Amino acid sequence: MSLNFNVPEFMVERNEDRCIQCEVCVRQCANEVHTYDEEDNKVYADETNCVNCHRCVLMCPTRALSIKKHSLEFRENANWTASAMNEIYKQAQTGGILLSGMGNPKPYPIYWDRMLLNASQVTNPSIDPLREPMETKVILGRKPEKVTFDEDGNMTTKMPPQIELSTPILFSAMSFGSISKNAHASLARAARETGTLYNTGEGGLNKEFYEFGKNTIVQVASGRFGVHKEYLNAGAAIEIKIGQGAKPGIGGHLPGEKVGEEVSATRMIPEGSDAISPAPHHDIYSIEDLRQLIYSLKEATDYKKPVFVKIAAVHNAPAIASGIARAGADVIVMDGYRGGTGAAPTRVRDNVGIPIELALAAVDQRLREEGIRNEVSLLVAGSVRNSADVVKAVALGADAVYIGSAAVIAMGCHMCQKCYTGKCNWGIATQREDLVKRLNPEIVSTRLANLIRAWTHEIKEMLGGMGINAIDSLRGNRLMLRGIGLSEKELEILGINHAGE
Amino acid sequence: MLKKEGQIRIPSGCAISGIMNRKGERFSGEDIIASIALMHERSNGLGGGFAAYGIYPEYKDLFALHVFYDDVEAKIRAEDFLNTHFDIESSGKIPTTKVSAITKSPMIWRYFIKPRKFKLIESELNEEEFTARCVIKINTYFDGAFIFSSGKNMGAFKGVGYPEDIGEFYMLDTYKAHLWTAHGRFPTNTPGWWGGAHPFTLLDWSIVHNGEISSYDANRRYVEMYGYKCNLQTDTEAITYLFDLLNRKHHMPLETVVKVLAAPMWQDIEKEAPEQAKKLKALRAVYASALINGPFSIILGFKNGMLALNDRIKLRSLVAAEKGEMLYVASEESAIRVVCQNPDKVWTPKGGEPVIGLLNEEAKV
């Protein structure tokens, strides 16, 4: 074995005057950075393993710890950056594919931050959400073109199944397996508390969570893990996952170490076996096959559940979305290239797919040109970071948004991007019992519900400022947006004017 | 150069008024001019207009087109198109008189027409849809030509100026109608293009509107899915198309259309009986993008009557009154009292609650 060229990314600084050798950091760090030396009565750190998750810093009772970027610098080079070189060292060492967790961290443009919102002044009044009703209710599902009535005024239109949300924010798919049971429980409870939905991801649904059915979207992905009739009928909606923003075009792999007793039972696979989701669904090789799967699922659930189809935002998204709408999906979900994940090949995560803002604008416009936008709902994800992103997404044309990364951050995630190691110190992306129990669903579900409530309050403030009192009137209302620092082409794709126009 | 309506979105505040005789008895334009003139302060001289129903009984089966032309070339091009698609029964200048306050008027022409039979058969459309499409086509693709009125036995009269001056300019005291609506405009940014004034019309629909809707682009992008083109980028245009889509194309009764455009709040829907709640919920789900948000009061004229409506939280003034067979609606009560001193009843409609005046059965068109 040759010398490991990789150097630590972070430095652990311990203030020896403050350290009381209580060993909390030793016990808290699943990466085994800290060790206690009895002879010296001192705690030492091997920072090679440090991922900068802040667990030890926040748990240290005397605030003795801080983590810094490692000062070990390479000679400055704009082309051969430290990360470019480190990645080569790693691959030269292992011969493997580079893995990463969470979403694309590269400094590509973030279009949310290049759009500004409007507000009312004089010619129409802003509306105060503290004094007037401000409606954020969203109804997802396939809509008929029109509502018809008989001569007595009775409705003759039969409405397809619809889902009511109190706010245009849902929790994104995260499977039991990729995240812990306690994390799942927190999402489910928060969804119920705030009148929205969470999504099982492709790991099946633990029986204990069936009681949250009305607030659950059950996912059917290429691995078909945990899919059976009862499961399909357990939720409020079914989502067919074709792709995911963090890794468009490829499948998934849950390592056998994470497949313990409960994961095994929920996924319906043997304990300790790798759970491999193939890149494509092996019964979907074209759009007509998708239609068959949509209708098989509708048959299995007696046409009572809306079927969502989720794709990664890729170059040809508008045409694909149009196909999905015509294949019978009730809701189209698009996940942008910044969407998070438990594990993805770094090169795929950082280089495949397109920004959700552009995909959303293009798809909404395309569906309108085809006259079918009103028939389907459009959900977007990847990545929505705050309530202003939500407002901008709705103004571009989305019915609602999914949040995944924001939700795990609310749960305590510190974006160390090491979810795939299974050593999540915050008890989120792990199945290790001692780590899982660090996450208390009682407390964490409140944090999640708080986040949803806070964003909803902010959405209401911004709506009121625009002189709008129902989120319906914001949807696709692109006059409420102005670009800042965007090229003509970008403005054209987003379908907005530049600030000052 | 200032951009005109159609090149840029121009918001405006306004005054509106409507007077109707439910028996269908016709009266001259003097009252409506007096009513709108009283609200002089609510306009700024950059637009005024009227819609009159029942003014062309001798041509009641023909579509009456009122057209603005910028120049003779535009007129030649548009007439070429009209001749190809319609039989023109009669045409000529709309009579006007000199008014010192009204300047720079375009050429204003009127045509009484019906679709050419073979064109209609070829198009597989009915008369109304065929005519509506031709009107939208001219207004979209024919530079310098703008059809500002296209209904039967009705007409719009509008221009740049205070409404009372516009009324005098078109000599509305010489016309007789059973329903008049009027508009005085206070745009905040317009070069004064005649086509930009209210009312906005399509076929028999005419709308006068006060307010600036904040849902404009959501409404526009919704109706444009169904073949409409919002060329003027004005609220009035979008609202007219919404009425046309829901009532004429989706066969929705006006009382229901109102429940879509000024939809009841979710909190109120939940208080309704289950059957009604289900209906209202379906309407809000399917027609979410047709909800008109922000302040507005409108008066919609159509062949059998008028409908006045406020936004659902009443951010604009609107008053209604009745005296015998006469129904009045206006932005201010004084604008009613100036032409009807002692009404039988005066009331302030709630937000989202329409005032609907229909012609009596025997008077219906």
Image (tube, rainbow, N blue to C red):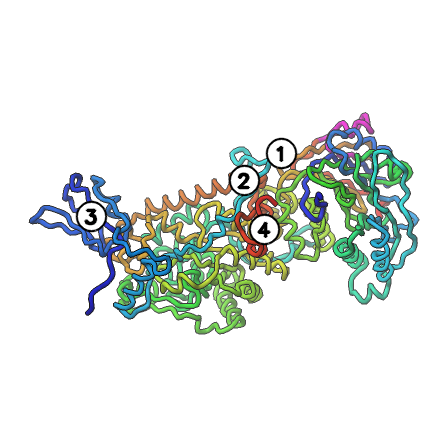
The amino acid pointed to by label 2 is Met
At x 76%, y 41%, the residue is B192
**Residue A27 image position (x, y, % from top left):** 19, 50
Q: Is residue B206 left or right of residue B278?
A: right
Q: Is residue A288 left or right of residue A82?
A: right
Do the residues at discs 4 and 2 belong to one chain?
A: yes
Decide: few, some or many residues near mark 3? Use Cα within 10 Å; few <14, some 14-19, many ≥20.
many
Q: Earlier in the sequence, mark 4 or mark 3?
A: 3
The chain that hosts pointer 3 is A
Disc 3 on helix, strand or loop?
A: helix
Write down the residue under mark 1: A122
Q: Earlier in the sequence, mark 2 or mark 1?
A: 1
Do the residues at discs 4 and 3 belong to one chain?
A: yes
Q: Earlier in the sequence, mark 4 or mark 2?
A: 2
The chain that hosts pointer 1 is A
Q: Is residue A468 magenta?
A: no
The amino acid pointed to by label 1 is Val
Residue B30 appears in the picture as rendered: yes
The chain that hosts pointer 4 is A
The amino acid pointed to by label 3 is Cys
Write down the residue under mark 4: A496
Write down the residue under mark 3: A25
Kindly identify which numbered label has been placed on residue A134: 2
Q: State the separation of the CA atoms marked 4 and 2.
A: 25 Å
Q: Earlier in the sequence, mark 1 or mark 4?
A: 1
Image quadrant for the N terminus of chain B? Answer: top right
Q: State the separation of the CA atoms marked 1 and 3.
A: 58 Å
Decide: few, some or many residues near mark 4? Use Cα within 10 Å; few <14, some 14-19, many ≥20.
many
Q: Are marks 1 and 3 in contact (CB under 8 Å)?
A: no
Disc 2 on helix, strand or loop?
A: loop
Q: State the separation of the CA atoms marked 4 and 3.
A: 51 Å
